[in-house]
Amino acid sequence: MDIADLRPGGPRELGQFNAVAAFFSLLMLPRAEIPLALLTIRNLLVPGGLFALSMVEADVDDFSIPFLGNNIRVSGYLREDLRAIIAEAGFQIVEETSYSYATAVGVPPEEQIFLCCRMGFSRSGSMRISSVGKSAM
């Protein structure tokens, strides 16, 4: 399912949840789409809801890599940049862990970042996504 379909008023509006998890799924989006995906997730949460996510730490945008015999496109952020994107979307990071993981023998390990966040308020106040997918106050 496309996360854009989950926005309020979207074709698959599901209501709100106590928690949302996105493990390595946001890295499949170009960087330009990640902030909107985060705001959509924020809108899926009840006040104070939890958001768990994982990303690979990498300074790449829509970059082609081999994965399970196919080429896929991925995006990533350096750790500080990821924290800033998360905060801008209105989340507070309550726990952060990371692990080094080598995807294959002889390949340098990637750093996998795991964040547990709580819905808070963005710097500009309470941001919500309108039914047309644009942020509104």
Image (cartoon, rainbow, N blue to C red):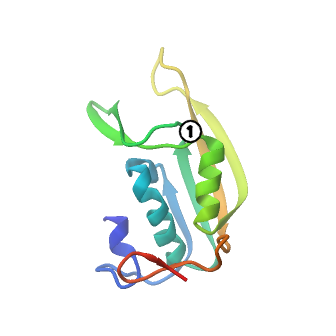
Residue lying at 70% horizontally and 50% vertically, measured from the top left: 96
Q: What is the residue that sits farthest to the right in this orientation?
A: 94
Foreground residue among 20 and 90:
90
The percent position of residue 14, horizontal first and vertical second, equals 40, 81
Secondary element under disc 1, as helix, strand or loop, is: loop
Q: State the image coordinates of residue 104 (x, y, percent, origin top left).
A: 45, 22
- Three-letter code, disc 1: Glu
Q: Residue at x 62, y 69 (%)?
A: 90
- Give the quadrant of residue 1: bottom left
* Left or right of 88, for residue 65: left
Question: Is 51 above or below relative to 14?
Answer: above
How crowded pointer 1 is (Cα within 10 Å; few <14, some 14-19, many 20+) is rated as many
Asked if residue 48 can be seen in this view, the reply is yes
Label 1 belongs to which residue?
57
> Residue at coordinates 37% horizontally, 66% vertically from top-left?
3
Q: Quadrant of residue 89?
A: bottom right
Can the viewer see residue 25 in this picture?
A: no
Q: Residue furthest top?
A: 106
